[in-house]
Amino acid sequence: MGHCEEASSSTIPNKNSNLVVLVCTGSFNPPTYMHMRMFELARDALNLLGKCVIGGYMSPVNDAYKKKDLLPAIHRVKMCELVCKSSSFVMVDSWEIIDRLKCLQANQSSYQRTLTVLSRIQDGLCKDGLIKRDSIKVMLLCGSDLLESFSIPGAWILDQVKAICRDFGIICVRRNGKDVDQIISNDGILRENKDNIISVDEIIPNQISSSAVRECLSKGLSVKYLTSDEVIDYIACEKLYLA
Ligand SMILES: Nc1ncnc2c1ncn2[C@@H]1O[C@H](COP(=O)(O)OP(=O)(O)OP(=O)(O)O)[C@@H](O)[C@H]1O
Ligand SMILES: O=C(O)c1ccc[n+]([C@@H]2O[C@H](COP(=O)([O-])O)[C@@H](O)[C@H]2O)c1
């Protein structure tokens, strides 16, 4: 797959920085309350470690990612904005989408790799000098299925996995009972960087997922309390996810 730009791995934020920005990349098709819970769980876990989360970004993946049943980005960005209204610190970073036009003009694929997203957010936060590069730590927030996918041959570029683990760090929410320690110990890169990977358990386990929400919607079932009312209204209004 071609890419607009490949991020350099030269950004090395201070591992001991107390200020953290969380970045969750994904389809958000549609965003659910579980996505929002992940930010809450991560913030609680980091607070306990003496860190302060100053913001969180949901970064919806570009249409070029070509995941099955992926709704056009314009809808996913809008729904992310709506679900974020319920949070005081989570917002949407739509750069993965917006950059598409520029890439199309340059005849490049517009899919943005996760390392690129993290690097760009960090560069953006530090560019005007208000925040020093070594005073902030940008971390990837993900579920354990994503962490596990690092080990799937061909799914990721190994040097980029190394850079994400070493230069940024990961906060991983256990999903469907998956043992995060086991995932880490089964993978060389994750093992080497285990001090930079924080595992978080959902205190109230649930199996809310975008695909389960889509399935309910396609059957005409209620999804109330699985995502925000604004998202549900938007889906109804735009007639999305019908069978
Ligand atoms: N219930 C959950 N528990 C933990 N992590 C989750 C949960 N739901 C989503 N995530 C994580 O949120 C991030 C974004 O998820 P994304 O929207 O791409 O996928 P998904 O919920 O797995 O979607 P789908 O169900 O459509 O495959 C990923 O890191 C994913 O692992
Ligand atoms: O950067 C990569 O190489 C890479 C490889 C696989 C997946 N991702 C990202 O992982 C996110 C979740 O993907 P998925 O397939 O679990 O919905 C999505 O934002 C992708 O851009 C990123």
Image (cartoon, rainbow, N blue to C red):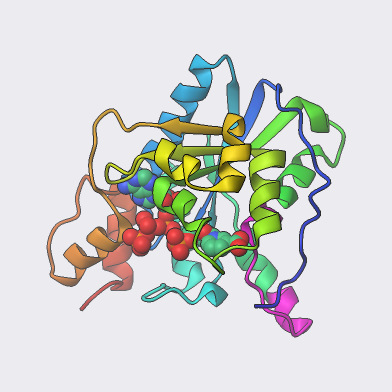
Whether the magenta-drawn stretch holds residue 93 is answered as: no
Whether the magenta-drawn stretch holds residue 102 is answered as: yes
- Relative to 11, say whether 153 is above or below: below
Left or right of 236? Residue 158 is right
The residue shown at (53%, 48%) is 187
Please say whether residue 104 is visible from this viewpoint: yes
The residue shown at (65%, 66%) is 98
Q: In the rendered structure, which segment of residues is drawn in magenta?
A: 101-118
The residue shown at (69%, 76%) is 101
Question: In the rendering, at what x and y percent does residue 214 appear?
Answer: 26, 65
Relative depth, front residue between 89 and 59 = 59
The quarter in which the N terminus is drawn is bottom right
Question: In the rendering, at what x and y percent does residue 227 appear?
Answer: 29, 49
Number of labels in the image equals: 0
Relative depth, front residue between 3 and 123 = 3
- Relative to 81, say whether 240 is above or below: below
Please say whether residue 139 is visible from this viewpoint: no
Relative depth, front residue between 135 and 84 = 135
- Relative to 172, say whether 210 is above or below: below
Residue 200 lies in quadrant: top left
The residue shown at (60%, 52%) is 93
The quarter in which the C terminus is drawn is bottom left
Question: In the rendering, at what x and y percent does residue 129 appear?
Answer: 87, 34
